[in-house]
Every structure is written in structure tokens, then in C-alpha cells.
Amino acid sequence: MEKKLLLLGLLQSREMHGYKINELLEHSCAIPIKITKANAYKLLADMEKQGWVTHKNEREGNRPPRRVYSVTNSGKEAFLNLLRENLISMPKPEFTGLVGLDLASFLPHSETATLLAKKLKLLKELFVELDAIPENVRNTHPSIEYMHRYYSAEIEWIAEIIRRLQG
Amino acid sequence: MEKKLLLLGLLQSREMHGYKINELLEHSCAIPIKITKANAYKLLADMEKQGWVTHKNEREGNRPPRRVYSVTNSGKEAFLNLLRENLISMPKPEFTGLVGLDLASFLPHSETATLLAKKLKLLKELFVELDAIPENVRNTHPSIEYMHRYYSAEIEWIAEIIRRLQG
DNA sequence: TAGAGCATGTAATATGTTACATGATTCC
DNA sequence: GGAATCATGTAACATATTACATGCTCTA
């Protein structure tokens, strides 16, 4: 449902067609959930069936025609309900990366340390993107601020585990 | 795949039947991912088809017969591969709770603050369980230590957001 | 004797991903 | 002329949830 919430949010700030939405979703590390292209098209179609959005066809020059979506009144109502719901609820996050850590005793410490070093490298690469966002932007966008802190804590954590394995 | 990894891990520490596994998974806040009952039965059946586990039927007194699963050699190999994979990879987590925060401008500050206060209460309740786990256990189980820190940071974060909305 | 616990699962539904299909236009 | 971009989607598959079905035993 957060996916629909996010899409409705985007469409309320400005009307958009599917392709544009997907561009935003793919090229931004600042979005806290993942929505693939096929999924986004599907969700828009579903929300249209539900009556939350409508589309009109548009065409710029000779480009392929676009479906420009906008939120209906019923969609705006649904949006507010989803938003309230999202703000009060506390979905337990899934820490898939921890499963392996708990089972690491099945491998020699040295191997675990080597593998985690690779993870750490990956993490640092992801962090670079986030860290490049100017501080004033970060401080006005809760999710960016959050993710910045999260990744930075994550890096510290993995580094600490590696240290323990080596010491 | 982390679900299969976790199940293989459990089954390697000791043989188990589905019901027992589900008990462990349900009554423990110390497990970093969620596996529902139906899903666990399904995964065990799937892994049996794959040749990773086998079962033998057992019966204690007149209780319903159990399928006691154990990991095959091929399963042990698969387990180690899944484990290595899990340790090097960095799956981007989904922060579903952040979607709403980014859209909070659609509601009056006071309402957002009230809603977040409810979330905070929920969070604190979840934290109590984790905090009750003795420190020595926590320090020897990475995922428990991690989740303890995570929830504690999460509480701080929501509290901070509420303060900002009020100030 | 009624309800909780033990033990297994299926069916229907929901959700999401991957890869593929289509066809025009623009850039090199 | 060929690749990248614009723009839409479908089909097949994978994964997971909810609710339901079954039937025995133990306890109050």
C-alpha cells in the first residue's frame, strides 16, 4: 500500500505519465522504497480501476502518446487515509542481512571477515551517492536524512563486526 | 532466499518438524525476518523437492504424526552458498515508514504529531520485549544486538520529528 | 463437553519481478 | 544505419498472505 501512497503523493504534486514516474523512481536514491517499472504501470492501471486516478492522452510533437494521470477526488480521500495509516503504523522491518550474521559460525572467521569486507565496500559505494546530496536538502527531506544516518550507522556496524572477527 | 537460509540454519542446529519451527519463528522477537506458518510449510516442501531436506515420520504417543526434517548433503552445500551470498550482498532495505513522513505536508502539523505519537507508543512497546533480553545474550547474537540498537535509534528519531513539528 | 493445543496442509488471492513485445524518434 | 531514448504494456513466473479444512488429544 505504501507504493500506492507514494504514487498518489507524486501525482498530487504534479500530473505525470508512467514513463516520467518511472524515471523519477529509478534515478533517485532518495526514495525509501523500490517500485519497478512494470509494477508502477500495473499500480496506475489498478488505481484507475479503483477510481483513484484518471488519465488523459497527450502527445508532444511526434513522440509516442502519453497517458497523463491525475488524482480524482476519491483518490485524494484515499490518499489521506493511506497517509494517516502510514504515519501511525510501525511495520516491522525485515533485516535480511542479519540472517547470515547469526549463522556465520558455520564458516571460519577469516572467511566471514573477507565476505563482510565486500559488503562493506558495497555499502560505502551506496553511501557516496547519499552523502553527495547537499546538507540543506538533506535536512528538509526526512527520508534522505534518515537514510543518510542509517547507512552511516550500517557502515560502522559492519566495520565493528569485522574488527571483532579479527581480534 | 534468506527464508530458506534461515530454515536450513535452524535445521542444521537440530532436526525439527514444521510445527516446532513455526513456534520458534512466531514466539521470538529475536528473528530478523518474518516467515508465516503457511509459508514455512511451503518452503519445507519446496526444499524437499529441490533435494535440500528430507523428512521421516515420527509419532510421540498418540499425538498427530510429525514430519521431522533434516538437511541433506546437497542442502548443506546449498546452505553454505546461500550463507556466503547473504554475507557479501547488501540488499537495499525498504523504509516503508518513511513514505508517509515525506508526504506529511499534506496534513496539519498537529495531526501529524498526534499520529506519530501513536507510532512512538507502538515502537516503545516493541522495544520492551527486546530490551528484556539479558545483555549477555544480546552481545552474543548479532541480530539481537542490531535490532536493539535499531529500535532504540528509531524511538529517538520519531521523538525528534515530533519535537520539530511542535517547535 | 468445550476449548486450547498439536500437527498438517490447501485454495484463493495478492503482490511483485523478469523478460519480452512493440514501434516511433532522435542522436551519433 | 544502428543504438539509445521515449512510451506503453503483457505473459510467465515467483513469492507470500489469508482464510479455511481436518482431526486427534489433553485439560478444566
Image (spheres, coloured by chain):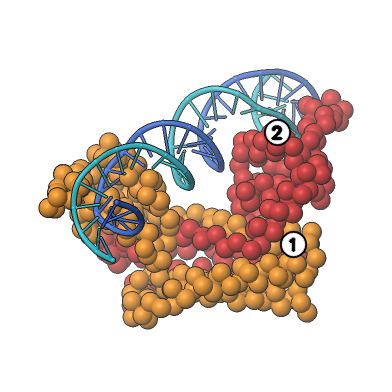
Chain colours: A orange, B red, C cyan, D blue
The crowding category of the residue bearing disc 2, from other C-alpha atoms within 10 Å (few below 14, some 14 to 19, many at least 20), is few
Q: Is residue A103 above or below residue B135?
A: above
Mark 2: amino acid: Lys
Comparing labels 1 and 2, the label whose residue is closer to the camera: 2
Which residue is found at the position 40% from the left and 70% from the top? A144
Q: Hey, which quadrant is residue B134 in on the image?
A: bottom right
Residue B126: x %, y % from top left = 57, 59
Residue of label 2: B49
Residue of label 1: A104
In front here: A35 or B141? A35
Q: Is residue C13 above or below residue A121?
A: above
Quarter of the image where the C terminus of chain A is located: bottom right
Mark 1: amino acid: Ala
Residue A86: x %, y % from top left = 40, 55
Residue A76: x %, y % from top left = 24, 49
Distance from Cα at disc 1 to Cα at disc 2 = 26 Å
The crowding category of the residue bearing disc 1, from other C-alpha atoms within 10 Å (few below 14, some 14 to 19, many at least 20), is many
The answer to whether residue D20 is left or right of residue B67 is left
For residue B83, the mark is: none
In front here: A164 or C7? A164
